[in-house]
Amino acid sequence: MNICFISNFSKTYLQAAVGQELKKYGIDVYWIVINQKLNNYLIEEFGPEKVLLINRENIDKYSPAIGEFKINELIYGDRAWRHDSKGGLEFLTNIQLPIYKFLKDNNIRRVFGEITWAHELLIHRICAQRKELNCQFLNPHVVRIPNGRFAFFTDERQSKLLEIESNNDFGWEVIAPKPPNYLAVNKKIWKKESSLVGKLGRVKRFVTNENIDKNDPSLLVNNKIRIRRSAQEEFNKLEYKKIKKSVFNQTSKRPFVFIGLHKQPEASVDVLGRYYEDQLQNINNLWRSLPHGWDMIIKEHSVAIGDRSSDFYKNIQSLPNVYLIDENTPSYDIIKKASLVATISGSIAYEAALMNIPAVTFAPCFFNGLNGCTQITLEHLARFDLSQISDMLKQKSNNVEHFSHKLFKNTFEGNVLDPVTDPTVLNKGNVKQLLAAYLEAVLLINMTNRLSNSCLS
């Protein structure tokens, strides 16, 4: 069996650790990489014949397209190419044939990668559409709740899990709402980056172009745009402090819908929530369906401060019965009192459904499998008001136990964060857990017992 990893920044080192162990089981490991430094590392570790470099410089400028992959959609959602749509169209066209030939010539049957960048999504679509490749794209990603578990998602919007057909017994428990561990990690990183030391570090890296590979298609290399974005972010942070926020306990006397804002740009919005990525428009559309006697409570994401201008907050505060509350208000306190929770793809909908609070998402999410959480569209908002949607969800039976059993069956223990965010991911025990999961995803058989006497024991 031949597999391929799509290199992804520092996560590459965790992928490589797993890849080296997979080789011991007779699995040939190939790579698609966009960064020159990582390309050199992977060639040294796996050999030049196993690595395909696709960057701005290393691709034939006149390679033909091999299919219709909605390239404009990929450019629109990519945080780098959206600033250079012409260059993005050219790059994403030119890499199609080299990728196809690499997968076909090396008889690759599984591709493992993220679904953040345009080239990753393009590869996903090539695997899905070109059936003759007989190649499946799998996205290893945390399932948020419970902590310490991940799944292999089969679709590019992380709504469908690879189902593991195994008759072996497995441990499971009824899932209880608990904030995902990565939220605390992200908040810690954001706090560090927002400090004076962090800001000075960013200035230094900007001046020296440290870690900037100008041929890396996932990086924004236009200095004018980088300066403008950084300055705008700092200005937005200062302006946010001036925005008056309401106190939650003073605004929760009536039924309300709770909306937690997303950090943006972010794959959870721009990729998973495509066509619903305009958060201000979503708020306006939900407000149009706000029933008489209801309020709308909105909370900013603590790590998203600086993403939005003061006009964004002024627009939502101009709507009657809409309240912006302090970002430090615990979300669980709000969810428990909400009549409905609404989000694009956020964990607050997952947590709400586990608390038996009705919740809706604009993007399809795997936790829509909970009866208390459903995906809605603009057509739903046109046909029903929010109280009707809430009532319909309340009428459904609680299926948390069934959902929990299925989720545990098709997920794995292990930490798939990158080594910079969490260095412990490279520990022997975690690599062993990931190895077992990858073997099961590759071979579609249970490997837990076989690994008990493996070289990693």
Image (cartoon, helix red, strand yellow):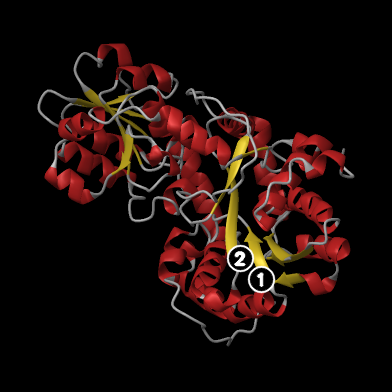
Name the secondary structure under disc 1: loop
Please give left or right for residue 152 compared with residue 229 in the image.
right
Q: Residues within 10 Å of mark 2 (few under 14, many from 20)?
A: many
For the point 49% across and 68% down, the residue is: 84
Please tell me which residue lies in front, 210 or 418.
418
For the question of whether residue 197 can be seen, the reply is yes
Specify which label sits upstream in the sequence, 1 or 2. 1
Name the secondary structure under disc 2: loop
Q: What number of labels is visible? A: 2
**Quadrant of the image for the N terminus?**
bottom right
- Callout 2 amino acid: Pro
For the question of whether residue 329 can be seen, the reply is no
Give the number of the disc on residue 217. 2
Please give left or right for residue 58 compared with residue 249 in the image.
right
Please tell me which residue lies in front, 171 or 151.
171
Image location of residue 145, percent across then percent down: 52, 31
Give the number of the disc on residue 55. 1
Q: CA distance from mark 1 to mark 2?
A: 6 Å
**Quadrant of the image for the C terminus?**
top right
Considering every residue shown, the one lying at the far left of the view is 292
Image location of residue 320, percent across then percent down: 15, 29
For the point 58% across and 88% down, the residue is: 62
Considering every residue shown, the one lying at the far front of the view is 167
- Callout 1 amino acid: Asn
Q: Are marks 1 and 2 in contact (CB under 8 Å)?
A: yes
For the point 66% across and 71% down, the residue is: 55
Q: Residues within 10 Å of mark 1 (few under 14, many from 20)?
A: some
Please tell me which residue lies in front, 234 or 294.
294
Image location of residue 243, percent across then percent down: 34, 27
